[in-house]
Image: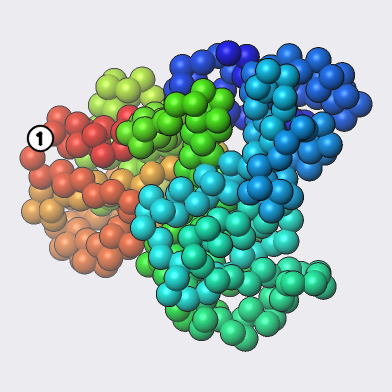
């Protein structure tokens, strides 16, 4: 089959990898300028294509038929060529619908606030409606059928789900957030359709509030699976979808190790490098190189606050996804922003070693005695629990802990 994606630009598309895993078919990228569309559709030299920005509405004029759901959303992101007849579909809406269903998200016990009024919002509206939910569309502009952010906050108690269908928070503007979750009292789910970064600031803030959250990467894979059904007539199994998500995340997401000094993070990072071939970054070593002195000397000469500032700068340098292992200093959890940076494209693993197995070290100025270690553990244990995605107990052998990390992270 001749399959592919059209759009402009296409530099960082996941689509070829996703479709090759799901259906083992070759998949091309056609980066087209707008004045090249007429010729492309006149030739119709494809079996099926996906469509991304900025052409999801433009392509509709070239189609012979349009699926009702695509008509409702006002956009087409999937086109099938059946004997020269082009039919358009929208799998953005079905990918979101399938993700919500797959995680048991109940939209019928309250209202959903859908942020944004563009094409992504229309797909979200169609998905919510398909699941029997009621919604409000929130816009910063005065648009018929939409309400303002001010009105949304006034009626915040009605909303049990919030869906971000805006680009706010997308790379490279990752520090932006589209809504203040602190203003909501009844949210049960937060959904962000953004796929880059893997965990947006909105999702991170949901994690900090204990609200279940979903992101755009899974939606991306599920909409591709729905497109492959249209291309091939064969439904992609749930097992294959989950395998695809696992494989792609394993090949991209960082493993971030947090835990007490002498909990084994450095040794485990080295073992993970041998087991997975990943690059290892030791944040304390990076900081020491920047300081030009030891951590103990930095604490003595410039104080802990200065060290923590450099630590945050170093954490910010590891916000991108490059399938690395990042071993952090024990106190990295003292500032939430460090963890948000490291968690954008990383899965955070707490290497938890019981205080009785920890030991003093002169190289770490806050843990030079057993008494200090026990006190630090008591102070930090709640932070390690709060920020981690996975906990690995390291009270047996290091090999057992390393294998558990591999198993739980999917590497």
Which residue lies at the image location 52% right of the left edge and 45% below the top edge?
95
Q: Residues within 10 Å of mark 1 (few under 14, many from 20)?
A: few
Q: Is residue 144 above or below residue 282?
A: below
Q: Nearer the viewer, residue 155 or 95?
A: 95
Q: Residue furthest bottom?
A: 154
Q: Position of residue 32 (x, y in %)?
A: 80, 24
Q: Which residue is mark 1?
A: 397
Q: Nearer the viewer, residue 170 or 101?
A: 101
How many numbered dots are placed on residues in this image? 1
Q: Is residue 105 above or below residue 108?
A: above
Decide if residue 357 is on the left or right side of residue 154.
left
Q: Position of residue 93 (x, y in %)?
A: 58, 49
Q: Position of residue 345 (x, y in %)?
A: 49, 42
Task: Report helix, strand or loop for mark 1.
Answer: loop
- Quadrant of the rendering where the C terminus is positioned: top left
Q: Is residue 150 above or below residue 168?
A: below
Q: Nearer the viewer, residue 352 or 98?
A: 98
Q: Quadrant of residue 37?
A: top right
Decide if residue 142 is on the left or right side of residue 283.
right
Q: Is residue 277 above or below residue 265?
A: above
Can residue 248 be seen in the rendering of this structure?
yes
Which residue lies at the image location 8% right of the left edge and 40% below the top edge?
396
Q: Quadrant of residue 410?
A: top left
């Amino acid at each position: 089959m001749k399959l592919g994606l059209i759009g402009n630009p296409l530099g960082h598309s996941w689509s070829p990898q996703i479709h090759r895993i799901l259906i083992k078919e070759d998949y091309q990228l056609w980066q087209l300028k707008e004045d090249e569309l007429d010729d492309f559709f006149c030739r119709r030299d494809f079996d099926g294509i996906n469509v991304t920005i900025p052409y999801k509405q433009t392509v509709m004029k070239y189609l012979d038929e349009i699926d009702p759901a695509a008509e409702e959303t006002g956009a087409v992101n999937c086109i099938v060529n059946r004997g020269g007849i082009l039919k358009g579909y929208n799998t953005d809406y079905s990918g979101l619908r399938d993700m919500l269903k797959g995680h048991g998200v109940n939209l019928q016990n309250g209202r959903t606030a859908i942020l944004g009024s563009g094409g992504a919002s229309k797909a979200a509206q169609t998905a919510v409606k398909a699941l029997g939910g009621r919604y409000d569309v929130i816009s910063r502009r005065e648009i018929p059928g939409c309400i303002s952010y001010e009105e949304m906050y006034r009626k915040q108690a009605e909303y049990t789900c919030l869906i971000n269908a805006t680009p706010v928070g997308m790379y490279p503007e990752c520090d932006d957030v589209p809504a203040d979750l602190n203003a909501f009292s009844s949210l049960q789910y937060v959904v962000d359709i953004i796929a880059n970064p893997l965990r947006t600031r909105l999702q991170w803030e949901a994690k900090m509030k204990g609200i279940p959250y979903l992101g755009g990467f899974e939606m991306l894979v599920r909409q591709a699976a729905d497109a492959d059904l249209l291309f091939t007539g064969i439904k992609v199994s749930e097992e294959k979808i989950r395998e695809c998500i696992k494989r792609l995340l394993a090949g991209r997401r960082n493993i971030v190790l947090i835990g007490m000094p002498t909990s084994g993070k450095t040794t485990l990072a080295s073992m993970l490098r041998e087991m997975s071939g990943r690059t290892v970054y030791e944040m304390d070593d990076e900081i020491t190189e920047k300081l030009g002195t030891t951590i103990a000397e930095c604490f003595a000469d410039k104080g802990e606050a200065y060290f923590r500032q450099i630590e945050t700068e170093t954490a910010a340098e590891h916000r991108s996804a490059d399938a690395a292992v990042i071993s952090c200093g024990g106190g990295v959890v003292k500032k939430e922003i460090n963890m948000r940076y490291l968690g954008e494209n990383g899965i955070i693993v707490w290497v938890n070693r019981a205080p009785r197995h920890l030991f003093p070290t002169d190289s770490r100025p806050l843990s030079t005695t057993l008494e200090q270690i026990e006190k630090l553990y008591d102070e930090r244990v709640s932070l390690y629990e709060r920020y981690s995605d996975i906990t690995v107990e390291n009270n047996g052998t290091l090999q057992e802990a390393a294998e558990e990390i591999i198993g739980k992270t999917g590497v």
